[in-house]
């Protein structure tokens, strides 16, 4: 059984951390960062051409991390593959005994470093969840029996700060119907957003594990940029002021992240956290220290 699934079933506060593959073949720094959190997290998410930018593949990186003793969460998007390729990569993940899968639609290619690339989008996140569930059942999308089947623990993403929030929760329910058992959220920085999200999911009868996204702030400018340009993210003014006045911006961002994780855990409003250090994976152990985890 996946460590992440086991943690949820035991009612433990689950922790995952994002690990982005490099633009190249040298994974030494990534492996070093991952090993420092071994035993402290239930999974390491490996991004899949994040922001439509060329990197080493999620599947290859997951295999390397698994060989290093970590439990990977294999992210897969529908942007770059048709249904044949998606099924092939999922089966390959099954061959490597990778159990956790996070299904994403994927950012549009125009936002990345190869803007001329042709997007595919044969399947969106719901479609990927559906096909992964079919593969779990021992068949492919064409109804052909598989010789050996995977056993995926499926997840998806959700944005708690969304207007109208009801529509986002309706989409959550579609993903759950398609096979999602857990959700990782867009970054959250205030408890009020989390409370409203919890109220809406409860009102709509949503039954799935939710891990709150944590992106450590690096500067006041970063916070202002996200507020202006990243849908679904809101950084309160008091946090922007803290970052602006801090002598050590990185340390203050780590402290803020740790404090929020503590508050989230104590609130009981979610089932865990997902830390997205975005290029500063070496800071994840420091965030866990600050949070007392």
Image: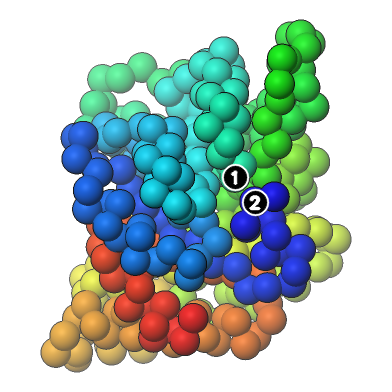
User: Observer-nearest residue: 104 or 144?
Assistant: 144
Label 1: which residue? 100
Circle 1 — which element?
strand
Number of residues whose C-alpha sits closer than 10 Å to that of mark 2, classed few (under 14), some (14–19) or many (20 or more):
some
Q: Decide if residue 143 is on the left or right side of residue 269.
A: right
Question: Disc 1, disc 2: CB below 8 Å?
Answer: yes
Q: Residue 263's spot in the image, x, y percent?
A: 55, 87
Q: Decide if residue 186 is on the left or right side of residue 199.
A: left
Circle 2 — which element?
loop
User: Observer-nearest residue: 146 or 142?
Assistant: 146
Label 2: which residue? 2
Determine if residue 270 is in view.
no
Q: Earlier in the sequence, mark 1 or mark 2?
A: 2
User: Observer-nearest residue: 162 or 67?
Assistant: 67
Q: State how far apart marks 1 and 2 are (Cα).
A: 7 Å
Q: Residue 78's spot in the image, x, y percent?
A: 51, 28
Residue furthest toward the left? 247
């Amino acid at each position: 059984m996946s460590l992440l699934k086991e943690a949820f079933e035991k009612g433990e506060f689950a922790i995952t951390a994002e690990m982005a593959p490099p633009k190249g073949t040298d994974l030494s720094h990534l492996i070093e960062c991952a090993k420092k959190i071994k035993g402290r997290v239930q999974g390491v998410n490996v991004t899949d051409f994040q922001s439509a930018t060329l990197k080493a593949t999620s599947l290859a990186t997951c295999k390397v991390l698994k060989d290093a003793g970590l439990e990977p969460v294999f992210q897969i998007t529908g942007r770059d593959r048709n249904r044949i390729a998606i099924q092939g990569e999922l089966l390959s993940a099954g061959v490597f005994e990778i159990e956790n899968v996070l299904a994403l639609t994927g950012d549009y290619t125009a936002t990345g470093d190869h803007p001329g690339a042709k997007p595919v989008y044969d399947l969106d996140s719901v479609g990927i969840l559906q096909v992964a569930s079919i593969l779990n059942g021992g068949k492919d999308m064409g109804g052909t029996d598989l010789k050996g089947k995977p056993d995926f623990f499926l997840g998806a993403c959700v944005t708690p700060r969304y207007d109208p929030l009801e529509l986002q929760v309706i989409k959550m329910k579609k993903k759950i119907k398609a096979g999602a058992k857990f959700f990782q959220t867009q970054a959250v920085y205030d408890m009020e957003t989390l409370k409203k999200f919890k109220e809406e999911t409860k009102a709509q009868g949503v039954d799935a594990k939710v891990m709150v996204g944590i992106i450590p702030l690096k500067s006041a400018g970063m916070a202002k940029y996200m507020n202006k340009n990243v849908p679904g993210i809101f950084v309160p003014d008091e946090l922007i002021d803290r970052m602006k006045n801090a002598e050590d911006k990185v340390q203050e961002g780590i402290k803020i992240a740790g404090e929020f994780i503590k508050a989230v855990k104590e609130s009981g409003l979610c089932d865990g956290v997902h830390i997205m250090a975005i290029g500063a994976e070496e800071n994840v152990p420091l965030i866990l220290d600050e949070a007392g985890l």
